Image (cartoon, helix red, strand yellow):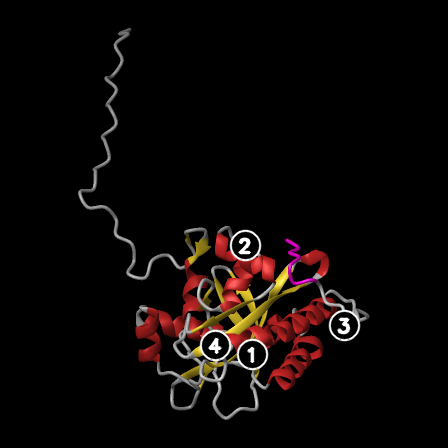
Amino acid sequence: MSNTRPPVKAPRPSPVSKVAPQPSPEGDADSPTAGGVIAVTRALQVLEAFTLGESSLPLAELSRRCGLHKTTVLRLARTLAQSGFMVQREDGDWRLGPAAGWLGARYQAGFDVQNVLEPALRQLTHATGESAAFYVREGNVRTCLVRVEGPQALRHHARMGEGLPLDKGSPGRVILAFSGEPGKAYEEIRKKGYHWSIGEREQGVATVSAPVFGMHWRLMGSVCISGPASRLPAEKLEALAHTVIAAATQLSYALAGNTAAPAQSPVRATQWHP
């Protein structure tokens, strides 16, 4: 018998593609990107495309604002509509749905808007004659959570929910200062317990703000009054600062669950609780 074995054929190498596989134009909707999920990010883009005062938008405009193809936006809008976050009108345009409003209501409820914030701001407006607002920090911006308009015909208007810079305007400066922001300017705000500004973020607008704390001196946000600079010069803002501090102190007690704090003995303006 022959011991010769048939030669073993070496496996043929698989052909190497000269062209790398190309992703689909819209990418994988479920793949993570920068720690997030593309589909969720795009859905939020669609919701955020609406600005204050816009009741509805056509699909083409949503596509333009989001920078996405119309077919992608349509798919996202229909998915959001299944959960009530968007609604398609009879003319084909899209608007925000009731679930979007309910989500905002639940967000505000976390700050006890109806029972604490609104009454306190109305009282501050009555005491100063100016519009009052409560700002909170959301990441690197501040947003107006609640606002009560003043009785004056000429007044400053702010849009609730709009992201504004923290380093421009007294509400943001106060939030930064009592969040521990370093620097001489912020140290001065911490020593005084308030801050006022004129035309810092918006020309012709004057504001004065003070910090609001919750349990264990956790910073909740800042309360401020605002109006035209022609009616609120520096000396007037300084005079109103004590009224704003008193309102912020009462808000702090209320949000911390202690309503028995005496109105005549607020937290010292020079004392900073990190």
Closest to the observer, 109 or 177? 177
Q: CA gap, disc 1 to disc 2?
A: 39 Å
Residue 8 horizontal/vertical position (percent)? 26, 20
Closest to the observer, 107 or 31? 107
Label annotation for residue 206:
4
Q: Can residue 192 be seen in this view?
A: yes
- Element type at mark 3: loop
> Three-letter amino acid code at disc 2?
Glu
In screen coordinates, is 37 left or right of 23?
right
- Element type at mark 2: helix
1 vs 2, front mark: 2
Instruction: Check disc 1 and report the residue beneath it.
Output: 101
Q: Is the Cβ of the residue at disc 1 closer than 8 Å to that at disc 4? A: no
Q: Residue at x 65, y 83 (%)?
A: 127
Residue 234 horizontal/vertical position (percent)? 49, 74
Among numbered discs 1 and 2, the one appearing first in the sequence: 1
Q: Main SS type for the magenta part? A: loop
Label annotation for residue 187:
2
Specify start and end residues of the magenta stretch as a single range. Answer: 268-274
Picture quadrant where residue 247 is located: bottom right
> Three-letter amino acid code at disc 3?
Gln
Say few, some or many: other residues with alpha carbon within 10 Å of mark 1 (under 14 / 14 to 19 / 20 or more).
few
Instruction: Check disc 3 and report the residue beneath it.
Output: 264
Which residue of the protein is positioned furthest toward the front in this rendering?
A: 235
> Three-letter amino acid code at disc 1?
Gly
Q: Quadrant of the N terminus?
A: top left
Among numbered discs 1 and 4, the one appearing first in the sequence: 1
> Three-letter amino acid code at disc 4?
Ala
Q: CA gap, disc 1 to disc 3?
A: 39 Å
